[in-house]
Amino acid sequence: MTRQKIPPFEGFPKELPDFLWGIALNNEKPWFEARRDIYERCLHGPVKALAAQVIDTLGEKYPDIVLTPHISRIYRDARTLNGRGPLNDHMWFSLGRTGRVYAAEPQFYFGVEARCCDWGIGYWNAPPETLERWRKSIDANPEKLSRIVRRINKMEGFEPISQPYKRPKGDPGPLLFPWYNARHPGVGKVEWFDPDPPGPELADRIAADFARLMPLYEYFLSLGND
């Protein structure tokens, strides 16, 4: 993905919420195909431009860290419909080392739906061995993660995104307890539309937050997720 081929992010059009509500209420392929131009203009195009701009901004600050984007599709996987319609009523992108979203590695992410958008960092599918390394790393040096978490706690709106284990795996103290016992460690924030979707400034805000979360990303990578 290069900025030469993708126009700058100009914000999400005001029609976006209505379009996404329309998908939720008319979740059928013919309805969508008749409105594919709206999809490209209101959803897919802006999400693709947003991902490219965020990558470019981070690349200027962290030239040695290569982030590969993955953008979700409008059509659900036919194997996982389970009685639902074929269309997703939301869209997201993730940024990681390979773009393999469901691999055992951390991802920056952004998502948008009819009423809000959210972004942060975490694991989509951390396997048990990764989580074991995660807890062992905290046991060995709790202060290393504590310094990162203290900085994250000063970031407005960010909270842990994972459900905890029903039975705690251990207790490293109040600061790290929710991180140590997370099924899929990560942190994120939700921003509700007020009332319209955000404009062009969103790209800079996301990139700035991702830059502040980079120490956590590097900590995740240090666990060895290949």
Image (cartoon, rainbow, N blue to C red):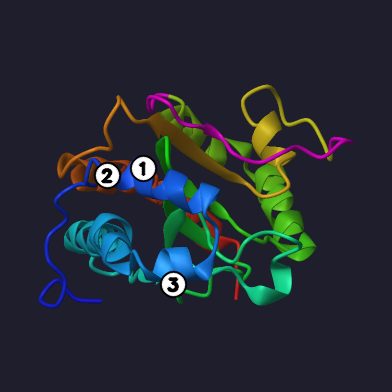
Front-most of residues 179 and 113: 113
State which quarter of the image contains the N terminus.
Answer: bottom left
Q: Which residues are magenta?
A: 154-168
Amino acid type shown at disc 3: Arg
Quadrant location of residue 103? Answer: bottom right
**Percent x, y of residue 63:** 23, 67
Callout 2: few (<14), some (14-19), or many (20+) C-alpha neighbours within 10 Å?
A: some
Q: Which residue is mark 1?
A: 18
Q: Compared to 24, does 153 lie above or below?
A: above
Tell me if residue 112 can be seen: no
Q: Compared to 120, does 146 lie above or below?
A: above
Amino acid type shown at disc 1: Asp
Mark 3 vs mark 1: which is more N-terminal? 1
Question: Do callouts 1 and 2 mark residues in contact (Cβ within 8 Å)?
Answer: yes
Distance of mark 3 from mark 1, alpha carbons? 34 Å
Residue 208 forms part of the magenta stretch: no
Residue 155 forms part of the magenta stretch: yes
Q: From this viewpoint, which residue is outermost toward the right?
A: 167
Front-most of residues 196 and 153: 196
Tell me if residue 51 can be seen: yes
Question: Do callouts 3 and 2 mark residues in contact (Cβ within 8 Å)?
Answer: no
- Badge 1 element: helix
Q: Image point 54% across, 64% down: which residue?
A: 28
Mark 3 vs mark 2: which is more N-terminal? 2
Q: Which residue is mark 3?
A: 97
Front-most of residues 208 and 220: 208
Q: Where residue 15 is drawn, which disc sits there?
A: 2
Quadrant location of residue 18? Answer: top left
